[in-house]
Amino acid sequence: MTKSFNNYCWGVFRDDIIRDKYYYRGESDYSYRLLPSVFRHKQKNAESLLYHEIFSRCYDEFKELNSIDKLVNMQHYNCHTRLLDITINPLVALYFACKKYGKESKKNRIGVVYIFAFADDEIHYYDSARIQMLAHLAKMDDGEKKKILDVSLDVINKNETSFEIDTDGTYKEVCIEKLYLDICNDIVAFKRDMNPLDLLTPLLFIPSKTNDRIKKQDGAFIISGLSEDKKVAEAKLRMLTKYELRINNVNTILEELNCLGINESTLFPEIDNVARYLVSSIS
């Protein structure tokens, strides 16, 4: 078990906080960056493009969903989003740290389980206004997100906690007013008191249990806010981690997890996954 330097710093600055809830994430390669998939994509406006395209092409499946539930469903179907999958079940995370994906079949592969610690007041739910606010960033193109980031950093650097209101009662910055009005489409009573720091901070949330996969995996998510670049986005997530466990005996662990009922058929309960598991188990 190793504790990173970032985690040491986090402990130094937050040693007055009791962090008593643990969540886990398994990665099949410890060198893989701790980032949501949308931050790995190089195409310009990839996030907003995927968000709008899947909604327009699969309208019936998404029309009744609010912005955060749309992102959760996109994540379910392997679309790039700003969500990072985590779980409350350490054995589920261990499975994902050991599971082989595509080219990751090398014999000496080392996986990793990230352990996150949160206090009770740091755990949010899918209907939280702060969570919905971050979800609405997915609709905006890269230029709009850059403007919101710049305005937010400017307000924070001035040691202020809210965006400037114009004489007519609207936000002075057009990009902030647009974001506010968009959020109001999901939350009618959304207050005009957005804190710029909330737009930059990754948050844990518990989703609505709308599909069997989330239920089986005891799933939760961390949703990322705005960041200057990938390095900063990753640094923010690593500041939430408490420990990293390196896993090298992956095949043995997968066999042991299977004996405990943790395998592809139980964590991915769709028929095609169950069938694939059954065929492989008797071959």
Image (cartoon, helix red, strand yellow):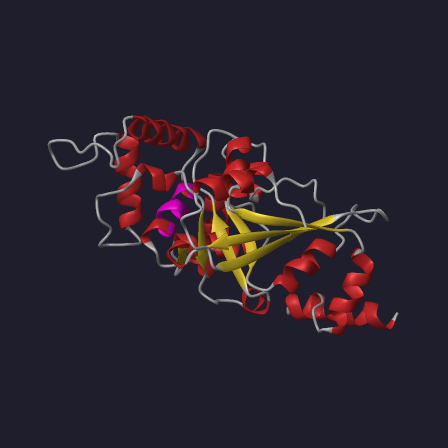
Q: Report the residue at 49% width, 34% height from top.
A: 45
Q: Is residue 132 magenta?
A: yes
Tell me which corner region of the image, top left, top right, bottom left or bottom right, holds residue 6.
top right
Percent position (x, y) of residue 88?
55, 62
**Residue 47, relative to residue 19: is it above or below?**
above
Instruction: Tell me if 258 is positioned left or right of 204 in this view.
Output: right
Residue 108 shows up from this direction: yes
Of 201 and 187, the residue lying toward us: 201
Measured along the vertical axis of the image, is residue 81 above or below residue 282?
above
Question: For the magenta stretch, what is the residue range?
Answer: 131-138
Left or right: residue 131 versus residue 12 is left
Q: From the viewer's perspective, is residue 230 above or below residue 187?
A: above
Q: Position of residue 153 (x, y in %)?
A: 35, 29
Residue at screen point 44% across, 56% down: 205
Predominant SS along the magenta part: helix
Is 90 placed above or below 200 here? below
In the picture provided, is 165 more to the left or to the right than 218? left
* Residue 268 appears in view: no
Question: Residue placed at 80% from the left, 47% from the top?
Answer: 109
Residue 260 percent across, percent down from the top left: 72, 73
User: Number of marks in the image?
Assistant: 0
Query: Residue 32 occupies which quadrant of the picture?
Result: top right
User: Is residue 196 shown in magenta?
Assistant: no
* The residue positioned farthest toward the right in the image shown: 283
Residue 166: x %, y % from top left: 15, 31
Image quarter hosting the C terminus: bottom right
